[in-house]
Amino acid sequence: MKLHELHDNPGATKKQKRVARGPGSGKGKTAGRGIKGQKSRSGVAIGGYEGGQMPLYRRLPKRGFNKPNAKHYAVINLGLIQKFITEGKLDVTAPISEDALIAAGLTKSKLDGIRVLNKGAITAAVTLNVTGASAAAVEAVAAAGGTLTVAPALAPHGKSVRKAQ
């Protein structure tokens, strides 16, 4: 194949319609906009206008709220950690950090941190250091003879947040 033999697939490109270029074009004079009225003028932004009727976006109820600075954690279950320990992908002798969990392939990235949940059973005595954990997960790791350390939450500007006592 040579450079001059390259071409688009048939139907991939379509010739642009040139409006307001005389009566022979089929879109001459008013360029398909009709005669007079708001839509025939330039700079029109009708958007959601429904001709005096209450627009749909005002008829629908507004409920709920999406927090703009919400934290998104990578969630890992205890049963999955135990599975990776039995397969030899995680070392129980050393403390298991978030980076070790990512390196083992438990999660792709830690997002705003890794949160451990109590789904499945853990039998190995492990030392876990993560951003968050459920109370049941902390109890389950302690019952297996290990420790689960939760890092203190950080404020938006990197200062640690003190919880009210």
Image (cartoon, rainbow, N blue to C red):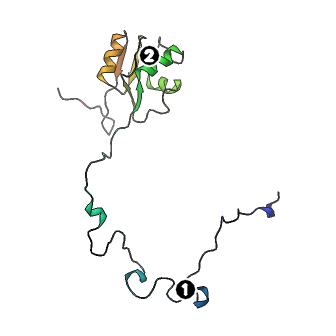
Q: Nearer the viewer, residue 90 or 26?
A: 26
**Disc on res. 70:** none
Secondary structure beneath label 1: loop
Please report the residue visible at 54 percent of the width from the left and 18 percent of the height from the top: 89
What amino acid is at disc 1?
Ala
Q: Position of residue 66 (x, y in %)?
A: 31, 47
- The residue pinned by badge 2 equals 95
Few, some or many residues within 10 Å of mark 1 (<14, 14–19, 20+): some
Farthest left residue in view: 165
Q: Are marks 1 and 2 in contact (CB under 8 Å)?
A: no
Which quadrant would residue 1 be assigned to in this image? Answer: bottom right
Please report the residue visible at 59 percent of the width from the left and 80 percent of the height from the top: 18
Mark 1 and mark 2: Cα distance apart in space: 74 Å
Which quadrant would residue 162 be assigned to in this image? Answer: top left
Few, some or many residues within 10 Å of mark 2 (<14, 14–19, 20+): some
Q: Nearer the viewer, mark 1 or mark 2?
A: 1
- The residue pinned by badge 1 equals 20
Q: Position of residue 157 (x, y in %)?
A: 32, 39
Labels 1 and 2: the sequence-earlier one: 1
Vertical side of 163 occupied by 25: above or below: below
Q: Nearer the viewer, residue 140 or 72?
A: 140
Vertical side of 10 occupied by 28: above or below: below
Please report the residue visible at 29 percent of the width from the left and 67 percent of the height from the top: 55
Which quadrant would residue 2 be assigned to in this image? Answer: bottom right
Secondary structure beneath label 2: loop
Q: Position of residue 165 (x, y in %)?
A: 17, 26
Vertical side of 40 occupied by 65: above or below: above
